[in-house]
Image (cartoon, rainbow, N blue to C red):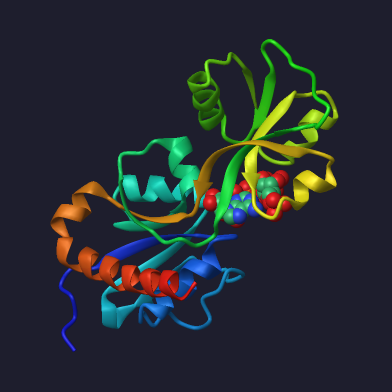
Amino acid sequence: MTIPAEKLTVAMPKGRIFEEALQLIREAGYRVPAEWAEDSRKLTVEVPEENLSFLMVKPVDVPTYVEHGVADLGVVGKDVLLEEDRDIYELLDLTISPCRMSVAGTPDRETVLNPKVATKYPRIADRYFREQGQQVEVVHLNGSVELAPLIGLADRIVDIVSTGRTLKENGLVELEEIARITSRLIANRASYRLKSAPIHRFYERLAHVVNEKGGSK
Ligand SMILES: Nc1ncnc2c1ncn2[C@@H]1O[C@H](COP(=O)(O)OP(=O)(O)OP(=O)(O)O)[C@@H](O)[C@H]1O
Ligand SMILES: O=P(O)(O)OC[C@H]1O[C@H](OP(=O)(O)OP(=O)(O)O)[C@H](O)[C@@H]1O
């Protein structure tokens, strides 16, 4: 077997996306060591026969590693890309970890002139309501966003909805969908030019698996 000349480093998001992304990479034929799993404390792993190395990082930090070029490639949720607006290339929709970014609130809410909107995603919320021609006050939270309308911190929320269970258990309803979210393969701009051959190989192998899965749905 010929080993690709240029080494690639891939930033992987720990947490929800990790196992699904790793499975996809393994299905593409990359023999990532079996002991590397979401609960692993090992933050880097090598696949020497492919000249690949993987990093395990916080999901929101994936674009930072890729933009700075310490990772050539990364896997990250579209929500993070919409919020961050980084100088990277988005190469491929991996179609994994699907969810949606939505506006939600209490079912009996009254119309408020300048509503308060609580969210982990202040830029997405701000942009969305501006596009709707509505002035809102965005309240930035780091989690438990569904609590905000229940205790009077906000009139509405902008957050990720997957099963809808969190909204339901807190008596909230989904009002508007802002965007469909899936995980994406991203690339550093310079790496994309300088390491085009191995990046293309990685892209092709993942795209093949994604297409096969899409076809079998
Ligand atoms: N139900 C969901 N809630 C949040 N993120 C989801 C959901 N389903 C899929 N995702 C995807 O998973 C990513 C978040 O993963 P995860 O929750 O592990 O990281 P995180 O936001 O850094 O977590 P936390 O800050 O809660 O530790 C999102 O960027 C999104 O693309
Ligand atoms: O529609 P569901 O399947 O219920 O998923 C959506 C919930 O999951 C996420 O929260 P997370 O578990 O990351 O907790 P957080 O409140 O700390 O953000 C998200 O922020 C929603 O609260």
Q: Residue at x 44, y 37 (%)?
A: 84
Q: Quadrant of residue 191?
A: bottom left
Instruction: Specify the quadrant that holds the N terminus.
Output: bottom left
Q: Position of residue 216 (x, y in %)?
A: 46, 76
Q: Position of residue 163 (x, y in %)?
A: 69, 55
Q: Quadrant of residue 185?
A: bottom left
| Residue 114 appears left or right of 42 | right
Q: Is residue 105 above or below residue 54?
A: above
Q: How many marks?
A: 0
Q: Residue at x 39, y 69 (%)?
A: 210
Q: Is residue 155 above or below residue 198?
A: above
Q: Residue furthest top?
A: 113
Q: Position of residue 133 (x, y in %)?
A: 52, 15
Q: Residue at x 51, y 29 (%)?
A: 123
Is residue 42 shown to the viewer in this render?
no
| Residue 168 appears left or right of 83 | right
Closer to the camera, 99 or 1?
Answer: 99
Q: Is residue 74 above or below residue 160?
A: below
Closer to the camera, 42 or 3?
Answer: 3
Q: Residue furthest bottom?
A: 1
| Residue 39 appears left or right of 61 | right
Q: Residue at x 23, y 68 (%)?
A: 7
Is residue 118 shown to the viewer in this render?
yes
Q: Is residue 141 above or below residue 93?
A: above
